[in-house]
Amino acid sequence: MIELGKTDNRNAPTRLLQPGVLSSLSNLELVAKAVVEGFVMGLHRSPKYGFSQEFVEYRAYTEGDDPRHIDWNVYSRTDKTFIKLFKGETNSHLMLLLDTSASMGFASASVSKLQYGKYLAASLAYLASRQHDAIGCMTFNKEILEFRPPTSKSGTLHGVIHTLDSAEPIEGTALHKPFTRFREHVKKRGLVAVISDFYCQPEDLQDNVQPLTSHGQDVILFHLLDPGEMYPDIKESTLYEDMETGEAIEVSPIFMKQDYPAKVKAHIAAIQKAAQGMNADHVLIDTSQPLDRALHSYLTFREKRA
Amino acid sequence: MSFISPLFLIGLLGIALPIWLHRLQTHATEREKFSSIMFMEQSQQRIHIRRKLKYLVLMALRILFLLLLVLAFTRPVFFVAPQAAVTENTTHHVIVVDTSFSMREGNSFAQAITEAEAVLDTMEPDDIASLYSASGSVTLINPVTADPAVIEAGLASLNPDNGRLDIGAMIAALDTLIESSQANFLIHFVSDFQQSGQAVRFADMVPDVINGRPVSLNIHQVKVEDVPNWSVASIEVTEVDQVRVGLLNNSEETQETEKSISLAVNDVVQQTLTESFSAPSGGVTYLTFNNIVFEAGDNRLDVSMSPNDSLAEDDQRHSVFDNSPPAPVILLTANPDSLAVTYITTALETAPRGYEVQLQNVNGFDPRVLQRYPWIIVDDIGSVNDILAQELRSYIDGGGAILAAVGERSAARSTLPVGNQPISGGLAFSRNTSYSVQRVNTSHPALDRAVGWNNLNISRVLPIQATTQDNVLISLNGDLPLLMEQNIGLGRLLLLNTSLDNSWSDLPVKPVFVSFIAEAARHLSNEEQLVREQTVNSFLQLGQSGGAAGQVYDPDGNRLLSLADTTRAQNILLEQTGYYRITTLGGDVLVAVNPDPRESDLSLMPAQALQNWENMVATSAGAAGTANTIAVSAVEEEPVSLEIWRVLLVLLAVIVLMESLLGNRYLRFTTGNS
């Protein structure tokens, strides 16, 4: 586990663009492309991670497959349509669940957690599309705000990115209803990436995510936190207003300096423990850092579950 | 309350501005949004409430600032009921205490204060009182009040000064000062009642019936017997190393005494004489100090007499001796042996300032030396050739001055040199007509002290036509000018239209000639004719000859004039004894100031005269009092208006300071938070 505000350089090269720079790119697709291309270039130099498309076998074309993958040479010889299957391509699908509650709108610097979540989700979608995975997405707060079922059809990436791009931070978070509906709509096994700040009780998270893992979904939790949330720096007592509930509370600088970081760390540990308990991955992301760590975690996760 | 400028109340609309701004600020900065407060705990101290209160205090200060600013501009006036209400039985005790120089004698002044305090003990509950001091002028110390303690405090603040009391002038001043009051007046006059302070006309010492109210006089005399008193009456430098000091016997009888008299020059005691002498009443005994050494310029002469008598302050005297060398002045002439030269030289050498006349022949005169002299004389302007005339005009243009006359050579010209005044008719000037002076401009500095111009016998003048630049100061019959002045650049030309010998007029042999030459010299050289020895409460007249007043320092070394006032003519009241110093471009000048010698005469007014005075006032009061008894009950004192804008300005300054401090703290808080 890394600490927010501190860069973890153990595995992640930091050649990717900083979030602040990404925020200057107006097009979310362009952001995703810039992030992933830079990330992939780094991978090619890495001996640990392979990202090849090694041919494995042919499979008969069935309705729903991408026609671009039909091997036309085989068709010309046999008049039958086959599609190529490559190593690492497991016909998996990736569902991106982006929390768009009001708390995700918090930003101590130029990029809010929601904006960072959009970059991350778009980059994952772009990466998945390069691997011909079916991708879908869902934005939620207390309700499901928008839902795109996973598909590998052309144009899916654009649709997903458009959905992500239009998300706004509003209202509070309640996992029960969105996740229940999600389970009802997505029966097929796949990868589920939940991007949220997880300001909820770990038990609540467990109650709602556990059913997903129980049904065979591979879940990865991207836990986004702003450095200002972990180490708030105030010099005098401040009246803080909760962005979701509107409640206000006056806190002293001593509390915020000594007690508050410990409470946040305990919460993160509890979330992490809950994730372990339901066989999900938990990745803590500092929104002031580049997306390397998140993408690495995703690839590791995907390779592990493939 | 009322407002002198109520239109400024529109400015109260400006109060909306801080309210609006603070409301915006409150929304903007009161709370800070945070993603979730689920891990936060309430602070023990409700600091935000204090901050909110502080914020409200800041807003209140700003509103108060605007309110006070508007009120200061509207100039509110409060009408306060007079402290002392007047009833039918009210008597207004007007207490007048003599603070003149003579009250320094013995314990006279302490006795006067005791007498005045005794008056306060006689006041009835309905009575009111006011306090005045009387010396060279009458000063209101305490306005009308019913509280004797206020008057007692005023009495405690009084001290004798160096002025002279004239009872007639004092009564006239009192008439003016208390004429607006409405009660029955009882004037308590506490004094030593010197004979010398008595008015010339006895009627002048009777106050008018003020506002139709009866006036009574109570005399409180602090001395009943004459006190012998010697004073230093005069200091005179009779020779270049000899000083004569006059000692005056102010007693009613011949006095014989032995005194030590010291003479100090510039604070250095040069001689002390101890002699026995006597003098009759009002008589002066002179002592002579020989072999006295003076410095160049002004010398301070201080004479003191010991042992002191009961009025010690007049046992010393100050004087100034000007030991400056005579000022040089050029006399341009074509004939050094003429009578004109003799007359002018004599007149200048006898002038108070003293001038050293340097004769220069107009032929071959080197005009380059002109710059060394502030002014020169030309006995016949017609003797000046055109080249020299141009040089003289340039000299005047640069700030020099010329006193010129006409003569035989001028009569031969059609236009006078330097001033370029045309002579109509050329040589056709009168030989047999007698001229008389028609008009003298006595406001001119060169003529303000000269009298006798009308007695001149003038037989010959030139028919000079004054130009537009000429200011005719003395005109003759037939509209002919006798004396005129022309300003040329920074300087001036003073032209006398008659000769300086006695062939054209008898001016040079008349007394007016000496004073005229002296005044003209003073005027043309921009020197002040200061009286070097003056009495307290006289005026020092500066800048009267057209120059700047210069800075004046009192005997304590304090500046008396602002920088702007030093450039203008000034009349300065001399209130202290000692040496006043006047600093001008020409150097420092000293003026010695001594008490009025009449204050040293401690002879008292006869008891009968004092009784008559009281009776005369009582008689006058009885006539007026009967007619006005009923009117008293209807009289109401006018409310006193009280302007408070000055107080508002002080409050404004305090609020600006508080707002700055509080605003600064608030600013520090918000930036720290961000």
Image: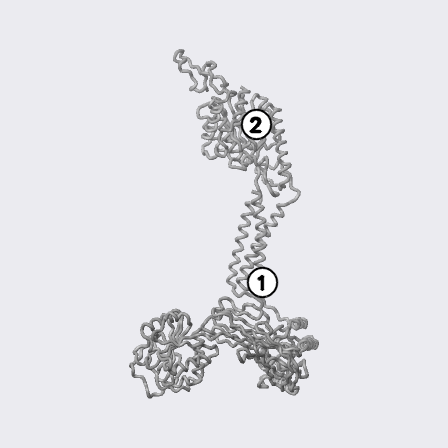
Quarter of the image with the C terminus of chain B in it:
top right
* Image: B164 above or below B34: below
Q: Nearer the viewer, residue B616 or B232?
A: B232
Q: Position of residue B611 (x, y in %)?
A: 65, 86
Q: Nearer the viewer, residue B393 or B88?
A: B393
Q: Nearer the viewer, residue A261 or A104?
A: A261
Circle 2: residue type: Val
- Residue A276 occupies quadrant: top right
Circle 1: residue type: Val
- The chain that hosts pointer 1 is B
- The chain that hosts pointer 2 is A
Q: Residues within 10 Å of mark 2 (few under 14, many from 20)?
A: many
From where the camera sits, is residue B177 visible? no
| Residue at numbered disc 2 | A283
Circle 2 SS class: strand
Q: CA distance from mark 1 to mark 2?
A: 70 Å
Q: Which mark is residue B647?
A: 1
* Image: A99 above or below B459: above
* Image: B176 above or below A269: below
Q: Position of residue B557 (x, y in %)?
A: 56, 68
From where the camera sits, is residue B381 visible? yes
Q: Nearer the viewer, residue A1 or B593?
A: B593
Q: Residue at 55% x, 46% y: name it.
A: B27
Q: Residues within 10 Å of mark 1 (few under 14, many from 20)?
A: few
Q: Position of residue B241 (x, y in %)?
A: 54, 77
* Image: B614 above or below A189: below
